[in-house]
Image: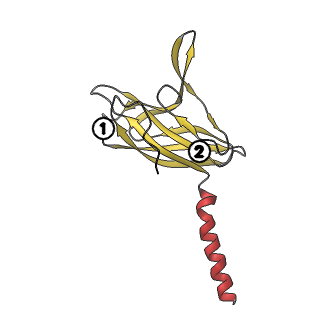
């Protein structure tokens, strides 16, 4: 019986491990392709945090400068600006999409072509200040693509 209890405890620990480490999920990550000579583009995705958190930074070997940006209307003009943090309310999906919040990749190391992938490291912090990094491989999509991919089934 002690052996069974030990096996059960080990199984429960392994079953709980993904939940304990998967506090933030990132889905549908994609980057818009660029034309030759274009040195910047956006990365888009859906981010969901199990508990209140914030996206506070990002990095990629594909770009020398990576920032979190927002786009908003000011005086009838659409403006884009860098922000220090993007709040992620517990359990609520936050979409980073064209015309809204996004990750800006600037000073690209090379042109990004449709069909490729871009590695991204996203930096998050929870309410207690604990940091978490999430590695993402974003697909490179058409220059003209402005809509998110169809939801996964």
Q: Can you tell which mark lies on residue 48? A: 2
Question: x%, y% of residue 80?
Answer: 51, 21
Q: CA distance from mark 2 to mark 1?
A: 26 Å
Image vertical order of residue 133 relative to residue 87, above or below = below
Q: Earlier in the sequence, mark 2 or mark 1?
A: 2
Q: Quadrant of residue 63?
A: top left
Q: Which residue is depicted at the point 49% across and 46% down?
A: 27
Left-right relation of 71 to 41:
right
Q: Which residue is depicted at the point 67% across and 48% down?
A: 130
Question: x%, y% of residue 135?
Answer: 48, 49
Question: x%, y% of residue 29?
Answer: 45, 42
Image vertical order of residue 62 relative to residue 9, above or below = above
Q: Quadrant of residue 75?
A: top right
Helix, strand or loop under label 1: loop
| Image quadrant containing the N terminus | bottom right
Image vertical order of residue 100 relative to residue 148, above or below = above
| Residues at circles 2 and 1 in contact by the CB criterion of under 8 Å | no
Q: Residue furthest left?
A: 36
Q: Residue furthest right?
A: 128
Q: Quadrant of residue 125?
A: top right
Density class for disc 1 (Cα within 10 Å; few <14, some 14-19, many ≥20) is some
Q: Can you tell which mark lies on residue 114? A: 1
Density class for disc 2 (Cα within 10 Å; few <14, some 14-19, many ≥20) is many
- Nearer to the camera, 135 or 50: 50
Question: x%, y% of residue 85?
Answer: 61, 33
């Amino acid at each position: 019986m002690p052996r069974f209890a030990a096996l059960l405890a080990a199984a429960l620990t392994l079953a709980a491990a993904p939940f304990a480490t998967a506090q933030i999920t990132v889905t549908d990550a994609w980057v818009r392709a660029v034309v030759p000579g274009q040195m910047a583009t956006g990365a888009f995705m859906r981010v969901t945090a199990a508990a209140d958190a914030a996206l506070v930074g990002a990095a990629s070997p594909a770009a020398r400068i990576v920032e979190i940006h927002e786009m908003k209307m000011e005086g009838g003009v659409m403006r884009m600006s860098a922000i220090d943090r993007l709040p992620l309310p517990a359990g609520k999906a936050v979409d980073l999409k064209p015309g809204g919040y996004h990750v800006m990749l600037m000073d690209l190391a090379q042109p990004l072509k449709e069909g490729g992938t871009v590695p991204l490291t996203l930096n998050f912090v929870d309410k207690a200040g604990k940091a978490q990094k999430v590695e993402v491989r974003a697909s490179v999509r058409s220059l003209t693509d402005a809509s998110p991919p169809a939801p996964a089934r």
